[in-house]
Amino acid sequence: MCPQDGALMDAPGPAPVGAHAVLTADDIRRAVRRIAHEIVERNHGLEGLVLVGMRTRGVPVAQRIADAIQEFEGQPVSVGALDINLYRDDIGSVDRAPHIQPTEMPTDIDGKTVVLVDDVLYTGRSIRAALDALTDFGRPAAIQLAVVVDRGHRELPIRPDYVGKNIPTARDEDVQVLLQETDGEDEVRIMKLIPEPER
Amino acid sequence: MIRSTGSGQAQEPTVQIATPPQARTPWTRRHLLDLDELSRDEIETILETTDAMKEILGREVPRVPALRGRTIVTLFYEASTRTRASFELAGKALGADVINIAAGGSSVEKGESLIDTVRTLEAIGAEVLVMRHFAAGAPYLVARHVSASVVNGGDGPHAHPTQALLDLYTMRAHIGDMRDKRVVIVGDIAHSRVVRSNIWGLAAMGAQIVVCGPPTLLPAGMRPSQQQTEEPLGLPNVEVQTNLDAALEDADVVMALRLQTERMHGGLIPSIREYATLYQITPERLSRAKTGALVMHPGPINEGVEISPEVATSIQSVIEEQVTNGVAVRMAVLYLLARGKPA
């Protein structure tokens, strides 16, 4: 997850104001379960399916989708975790090195169908980095993309296969997906960003 | 690392992926000169970053584009195998261009000064300068004169921060939390930059530090004939022992140091053989330490001197692992120093 994908970051920047919830915990739960059904339906089962969550918040979402699939289908799905910070294309334009965490691939992805999972889809640059990272692990038969929120403003030819909710936004807005596992609560918020005053 | 269960085997239930701890304070340092300037939190950041780097080194093609287009120069005024080679591998694994300069064969031989040399290297685009120098403090001088990041790869008897970091990483991998763990460092304490950096690092992590060696190989201020004070050395407090058996009692980690014969101008020990008789880590001596205590050595080993061959190759020895971890730790350091905005 990159700052440009509009998630909670500790980096200084525009201060958010007027946050309001657009998805509640129940909405998120339903969206995750629907995506889980869609993934199984589209791929005709679980054969060769691997879910790969993008750190940080894509990982718990991937885990929830896997839990839902296990519940419906009675079979487990492999879940991996991908840190894309070493593949970002904005080197030298961030002030500090982002904190990186290990990438964990539960299985060989050659010939598998990998479903990338992230919280917010925005410019698409994180997904580009994730595709590069996945390529370093092997040659999947197909890569699909699942996101909780698609907020538009793509800068690359990337589209999601499974979307929790399309939320039209302005560029000066920020969308935050909060999750129990990382933030202590489930909610999707939208807020206005106030640019930092010139110094 | 791919934790594949192999083909044909039933798929394990969904892997448990721990939720990360709250983000640490962002990394803000430009240089890595010694560990005395780092907080526990900063050391943890380096060690956690090293975890991620280890995963990359376990891949079939251990290369990521994180530092693509960046130039790293290693400038070594002293001999080195593992430090220089592991910095080079670390830089290349991150996609950087790495240029190696040894003082012999460079314009240093024509009399170019240290500052002129580093300015030249900076002029050709060096963004990170990894340097080893025989003079303590040389990297500090350089850091004041360049805008590149400076990494101390060993300065005289003063400091060797990346060695201490890889030692900490190796200990953490086996022991976990180092608080109140007894770490015994044996040998040539007086001439060792490794021990100095390790004392800072271990103190920051809360370990209990014991140094042990013949009085002539203890630095002034640590010799038993003198009142031990903190002042003359400016180091954190350590327990000083001259009797190895007493020092090893209940140890969690035993780290032997290389006898630095090239830095000894004679007369400090009667003979290598006598040193080995009194201070070699042998199976009998090691039995005083905790069961399964780690045996470490920064290398290169003087064979049959600091550590007996059976201990060096025993399962308690993590000496080879130290070398492997050296690459991952140096990747973490290079990444943290070079990934931010250029100065």
Image: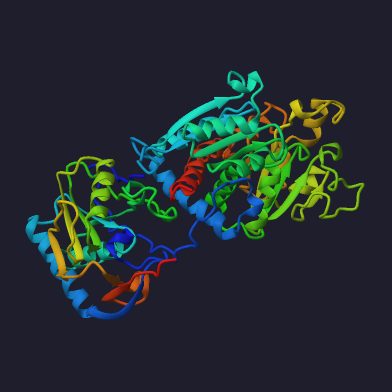
In this rendered view, identify the residue nearer to me: A180 or B80: B80
Q: Is residue A188 above or below residue A102?
A: below
Q: Is residue B58 above or below residue A46?
A: above
Q: Residue at x 13, y 69 (%)?
A: A34
Write down the quadrant of residue A141 in the picture: top left
In this rendered view, identify the residue nearer to me: B32 or B144: B144
Write down the quadrant of residue B91 in the picture: top left
Q: Residue at x 54, y 43 (%)?
A: B147
Count of numbered marks:
0
From where the camera sits, is residue B287 visible?
no
Q: Residue furthest front?
A: A199
In this rendered view, identify the residue nearer to me: B283 or A172: A172
Horizontal side, residue B134 vs residue A107: left or right: right
- Residue B152: percent from left, percent from top: 61, 40
- Residue B293: percent from left, percent from top: 63, 47
Q: Quadrant of the N terminus of chain B?
A: top left
* Colour mapping used in the image: rainbow
- Residue B186: percent from left, percent from top: 74, 41
Q: Is residue A122 above or below residue B156?
A: below
From where the camera sits, is residue A196 visible?
yes
In this rendered view, identify the residue nearer to me: B207 or A167: A167
Horizontal side, residue A10 vs residue A150: left or right: right
- Residue B169: percent from left, percent from top: 55, 48
Q: Residue at x 51, y 41 (%)?
A: B330
